Image (spheres, rainbow, N blue to C red):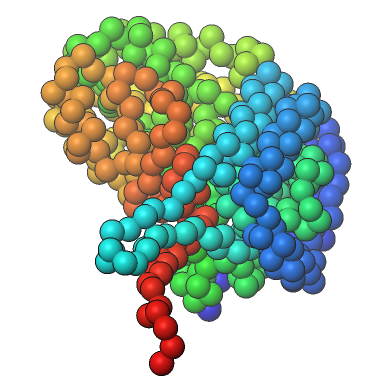
Amino acid sequence: MATIPLLDAPVTGRLTITDPRDGSTVGEVATASPEDVASAVTRSRAALAGWARTAPAARGAAVLAASVAVAEAADELAELNARETGRPLDQAKAGIMAGADTLRQYAELGPVHRGKSLRGAPEAVDYTIQQPRGVVAALTPWNDPVAVAAGIIGAALVMGNTVIHKPSERCPHLGIRLGEVISAALPDDVLITLTGDGAVGAALAESPVDVIAHVGSTSTGEAIARVAATTGAHVVRENGGNDPLIVDADVDPVWAASQTALGAFANTGQICTSVERIYVHRTIAEPFLQALVAEAESRVGSPDFGPLVDRRMRDAVDAQVQDALSSGATALTGGRMPEGEGAWYPATVLTDCTPDMTIMREETFGPTAPVQVVDSFDEALALAADDRYGLQATVLTRDMEHAHRAAAELPAGTVKVNAVFGGAPGGSAQPRKASGAGFGYGPELLDELSTVKVVHMGLAPSGRA
């Protein structure tokens, strides 16, 4: 069997979490043992039969009650989020409320999620029904921990699955408390929370579970897919991204810089769909870069601009920046490790970037805006498409032909035109290439977490032989 690479945290038996704002200790939690993992799978399997037989409306009501409970605990959960990951408190609370909203949406969608009637012989009845897949292992990240976990947990529960949730080792206190809040609305063992590092996630993924839903790094996601090929588990994964942004020649450079800064610096660049590389047309490059530098510098010291999640992440971000600088890039602002406590890193704008630089080829997951100047939209489109990832891409343009070409040609699950964030409710995308597989959110996630059975009902002949 293939093995899953451990995440960065060492196997110690306990996790010690420090506040990335000042380095103070948040607390310690125990790491689940292999026996704990095996017990969780056994308990979850035992709870499955009763939960799967529960009427969909009753399951929806329970998830709705969990949504209300999460909203009521928002201040407490947001404080834990801020302390463990450094996310500014108002942004952390917005993420908690987004998680509560997601639970509510699935509570409403689950009971009305329906099968299909089929056109068979006139004397027969043919239809499909959807049934739960079984035990779901949910491996979730730290960068928007409640919103992401709530989506997987909510969709799984309303379809009749049971869930074992392993939150990120970077925010285990938040994961534990979230599990307690949601579980209070559910029967015993329908939701179980396990804390620990990468070894615990690997043990859970290698266990006899029916679904592995993973949001995290590409290397771990690909290893999970290899393991699942031997265990038979269904895999849904959203993994790394190296999302490009194209700035066309015909847009206002100041507006384009504000959009770019929002995409690159929101949550300190720690969003799965953050802008990771920028291609700007030469004719507006100078005013665009000036405005982008001003946007970056306005974030220094802002209460809306937090630290990176920890110093390990900061070291990784700085390593990519320094590699780019040593390879010929220029830092117009930022690019230096600050002194003092915590895991702070400045919003950084790099120019003179080239496609061979690591910062242009790999996900950085930090507040960086590496820019390459191009001579045409065609050049920008080709560079944006030439990547091993395929999560999201953005194009800023007033040219409708260019917008349509970007939507058609960029190999990404989501293409945004003239807005780095936002979108209609209910949208659900499939990431491409190294960014993952399957629908990880939206109504289609209900399909990922259920199986379809076709039923054919004929008529027995009348009378007796």
Q: Nearer the viewer, residue 437 or 85?
A: 437
User: In the figure, 216 relative to 416: above or below?
Assistant: below
Looking at this view, is 289 or 94 the one in front? 94
The answer to which quarter of the image holds residue 68 is: top right
Is residue 209 among the parts visible in the rendering?
Answer: yes
Residue 124 vertical position relative to residue 161 in the rendered view, above or below: below
Q: How many marks?
A: 0
- For this orientation, the residue located farthest to the front is 463
Q: Is residue 40 left or right of residue 253?
A: right
Foreground of the two, 262 or 416: 416
**Up/down of 454 relative to 288, above or below:** below
Q: Is residue 325 visible?
A: no
Residue at 57%, 26% (x, y): give it: 267
Q: Is residue 175 left or right of residue 210?
A: right
Q: Is residue 345 left or right of residue 166?
A: left
Q: x, y (%) of residue 92? A: 67, 26
Q: Position of residue 399 (x, y in %)?
A: 16, 17
| Front-lying residue, 128 or 408 | 128
Quadrant showing the C terminus: bottom left
Kindly give the residue lying farthest to the bottom in the view shown: 465
Tell me what residue is drawn at x 46 percent, y 72 percent. 229
Which residue is at 62% across, 16% downward?
304
Q: Residue at 54%, 48% (x, y): give it.
A: 215
- Residue 123's x, y, as percent? 31, 67
Q: Does residue 324 sit above or below 47 in this rendering?
A: above
Which quadrant of the figure has residue 282? top left
